Image (spheres, helix red, strand yellow):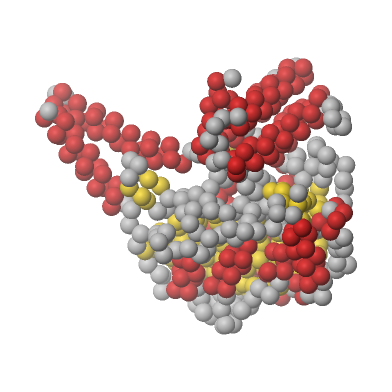
Amino acid sequence: MSSKIIKPLLISLFLGLFLQSTVIAQSISSSEKFKAYYNEVVLKVEKEDDFDQKRAILNDSFENMITAYERVSSMKGISAEDQQGLAEMHQRIMSKLNELNGIKGYDLVADVELDNFANYVQNDLEQANRTITISLTTLLLIILILILI
Amino acid sequence: MRHFKLSLYLFSSVWILLSSCQSTGQLTQPDTTISDQPTHYSVITVIHGDSDYLFHQNGKAYRADEEVLKEVISVAENAETGEYLIFHQKPQRRILLFFKRDNRQFYHYRNGQLINQKRYNVDPENVITPFQLEGELFKNYASTSQELDSNHFLYFGHEIPLTNEPGYHRSYPSINFSLSTFTDALDQFTTDDLPIFSLIALSTCNNGSPDMVTELSTKTDYLLASPQNLHLSHLDVEPLLLLEDEDVRTQNTIGKKIAEKTYQRLSESTQTAVTLSLYNMNKLDNYLNSIFSGYQEHLREKSQFASENTDCASIDTMNFSAPAEGVHHWYRAPRFGSQASINSHSGWGCKYTN
């Protein structure tokens, strides 16, 4: 087939794919990316056989989330509403971290319960409320920091 | 340059083709040749999908609204004497950042047959109240048969907020969506023959509350709702098929059947708390005034309240006294967290103030 036909076809195909990807990209929001991030954590915990490693994965992920909330919260220009949302999420994950390690009045999560605990945190993030009340832009900052940590 | 021109031509052709798919007209004409079978009951379902409804089960990602839609359609296809009006409020899409595309869908089943399917537009300039367009579609298409003996309204979405919070509908933040605008909007789905619903089911978090129950007390015989959190996998709809049984309709036990099935599934598949309550409005009639006024007083005490609900009975300052009758509730404590050891619940959800 001559290049006179192939090149335009390829360019059209590229434009078509670009168009389609733009549509799909719209539908994937920041909050969904955040849920997808934690789903990876759950899968890692379930895949790991060693209990110490399971606990370490959860500890690292909670600590990373807390660090991300703190960094974003200290940035200039974050609205008061977002600050409140960040504080709620910070508190939420902090209580999970405390429970995981059996401190601040919580019983230590038993080794054999670590998979269930990872799922508990996921269930908690995926309720039919509006748990994540912070703006999508602020949430995107959190995700960027989580990726960079 | 010639290649570019040709590409542009091809791309334009594809573009015109795609644009032509954006018709909001009727996709399926009403089928007037459907059987003469009687239609005994109606089910109106509004599925909100214009927000984040992603959840995971066993590592796999699902969209709650899409899953519920599939399940409701499956039920509607098997409902031999029922009418189903299904509204799927999907998000608006933008193609190449400029071109808006509406995806809201209406499905209309009668006696197990799809008789109408329509994509409809939202004009944010003119649509400012919930279900404005859905109400119009209901008026245009719902059966006016006097053989209908019961009607049911199911809403699947996030928590219906106490006060308007812009952004509930991600694509249309200007729509005023709150507890009062929601409950007012329900009047669009009733008829002179059936002025109140047999059942309203709210597949949302935190709406099994004194204010929601009071607001709906004159609009339904039964309300099924969750006083606290409800997992995004939503209420089970398969029990709706039991509406084919006349006894289930006359005794109005469908809310209980849905609650039992949902409770069983969520207890097995989730680690968080499961809270479901079925409110019998006739039996609660004598209690609602005092419950509502007590809750309003509690909310007025402070300017801010927590985003999450808690058991009303656990708030010391409220002096909440659960009615002796009128509420059937299902509760399973969370497997972890500070509430893990609490094995009882009043069946009512309230917000802490601070």
The mark total stands at: 0
Work out whether B147 lies above or below A57. Answer: below
Work out whether B30 lies above or below B48. Answer: below
Quadrant of residue A69 within the rendered picture = top right
Whether residue B141 is visible:
no
Residue drawn at x 56%, y 30% as measured from the top left: A75
Residue drawn at x 24%, y 33% as measured from the top left: A12
Q: x, y (%) of residue B38?
A: 56, 77
Residue drawn at x 28%, y 52% as measured from the top left: B20
Tell which residue pokes out farthest to the front in this image. A76
Residue drawn at x 72%, y 19% as measured from the top left: A56
Tell which residue pokes out farthest to the left in this image. B2
Q: x, y (%) of residue A62?
A: 69, 27
Q: In this rendering, would A125 be left or right of B279?
A: left
Work out whether A130 lies above or below B42. Answer: above
Q: In this rendering, would B185 be left or right of B290?
A: left
Q: Nearer the viewer, residue B221 or A31?
A: A31
Work out whether B3 lies above or below B175. Answer: above
Figure quadrant of the N terminus of chain B: top left
Q: x, y (%) of residue A30?
A: 52, 36
Q: x, y (%) of residue A105?
A: 87, 32
Whether residue A4 is visible:
yes
